[in-house]
Image (cartoon, rainbow, N blue to C red):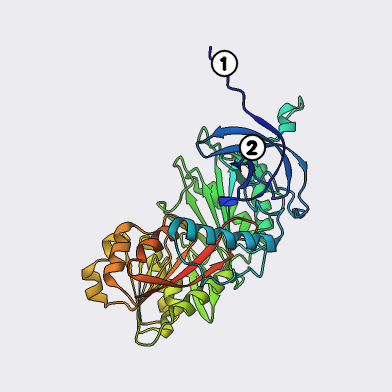
Amino acid sequence: MARRKTRKVIDEIEVLDFAAEGKCLTKLDGEVIFITTPNVAPGDIVKLQINRKRKSFSEAIVLERIKDSEDRVEPFCSHFGVCGGCKWQHISYPDQLAQKEKQVKDQLVRLGKIDISNMKPILASNKTQFYRNKLEFTFSSTRWLTADEISSSNDLGDRNALGFHIPKRFDKVLPIDTCYLQDDPSNDIRRFFDEYARNSNEAFYNHVRHEGFFRTLMIRTSSTGDVMVVVQFAKDDKELIEACLSAFVEKFPDITSVNYFINQKKNDSYQDLESFFFSGKPYIEEEMEGLRFRIGVKSFYQTNSEQAYELYKAARELAEIGKDDVVYDLYTGTGTIANFVAHQAKKVVGVEYVEDAIKDAKINSEVNGIENTAFYAGNMKDVLNDAFVEKEGLPSVIITDPPRAGMDKEVIDTLLRIAADRIVYVSCNASTQARDVALLLEKYDVQEIQPVDMFPHTHHVENIVKLKLR
């Protein structure tokens, strides 16, 4: 039998800096060591174990935190360190902002060779707690066990949980007491369904055996005070579903919208499932500068409503839209940006892959009396072609807000061929944005860069790049 390789242990070393994706790093004899364990901060003195050796760097985990950094702050949530969310609670908010700004600069320069001399300071979020408008919780019959519970000889008791998945463990869920991400009545709603499920004769879902009844709970709130609740059930039993949701409505009669899915697949995704409306109305509404945006069960909307307004204002300002401009809004989602800028433009054309989102975009134009928008559903690289441009008109402004993977090369080639005067690129992933912008530099210059913090206490950051045709 081959002898197991002994892993190198570094007894005492200082954490030097942050790295990409919220990780930290240190150096030993000139070699970079990336620390993959969360909840570490620059200035910490730690004991490390090298668990992966590469040609130019190593990866390590923390065995012990010997001394805390003076820059650490006290986390506000009792679930910190186990739950996968809010991983930067131990970092002060000003330090978080500085790191996010640095992260954007590094990725634009290192990956895209982009001039960042016109980069503005990051826009901070006014709220750092209770800022999310959407949370998804999971029912599980196999809750996460702590190391002490596992080693104990005591009866582990109830294994049911309603909460968040442990990072990288699809089958283990951490029961949540109080979550500081979403405002009231989110915690009370989750506690109701947890108690109801425990008192029922139906099981919490088992994600290994794929059996049970209660599967997921989604809560959406809005700045208008609307609340939507969506429950996934694993059995098509109308009597049980009606009993559960009727009890909920009786307890929370003011909830705006109650809906459910019957999901008998082996994953929790719901975009391909039929949604069922139970009570209230089948949507909630957001408000922005007097515009009302309907959000359905499957609709995408930025999860930080207040900061989304700041993001869209910044994008609109950078776009410099005039009354004679034709604007293309690519990856338009439910048409939020398109409708938000429509009053300044001659015409706005939105394109989005998800057909249901385009239906919402059209409704949002209709309910706001906006008549100068057009929306199309389909794969961006297939829809955005020469015939489309000929039909809808040559745009002078293009706003693009793609998913984390960025834009397909075919889409970038089309943008270069269209040669709009201005492109405003909104991104939730500065690395793929850097890759795409580098390709657009064939015809464009970067005029302005504006990072925006949408997600306090995480490493995630939005960024806007304005490009001007040479």
Which residue shows up at 59% across the image and 73% down it?
224
* Residue 189 percent location from the top left of the image: 65, 56
**Which quadrant of the rendered structure holds the C terminus?**
bottom left
Per the rendering, the mark at residue 61 is: 2
State the residue position of label 1: 3
Circle nearer the N terminus (2, 1) = 1
Q: Is residue 5 above or below residue 426?
A: above
Is 197 positioned to the left or the right of 371 in the image? right
Q: Is residue 83 above or below residue 300?
A: above
Is 376 positioned to the left or the right of 64 in the image? left
Between 437 and 218, the one nearer to me in the picture: 437
Q: Amino acid at mark 2?
A: Ile
User: From this viewpoint, is residue 200 visible?
Assistant: no
Rendered image quadrant of residue 172: top right
Between 97 and 358, the one nearer to me in the picture: 97
* Residue 263 percent location from the top left of the image: 46, 46
Q: Is residue 282 above or below residue 234?
A: below
Which residue shows up at 77% across the image and 27% down it?
154
The local crowd at label 2, few if under 14, some if 14 to 19, many if 20 or more residues have their Cα within 10 Å, is some
Is 96 positioned to the left or the right of 278 in the image? right
Please identify the residue farthest to the bottom as the structure is shown.
Answer: 323
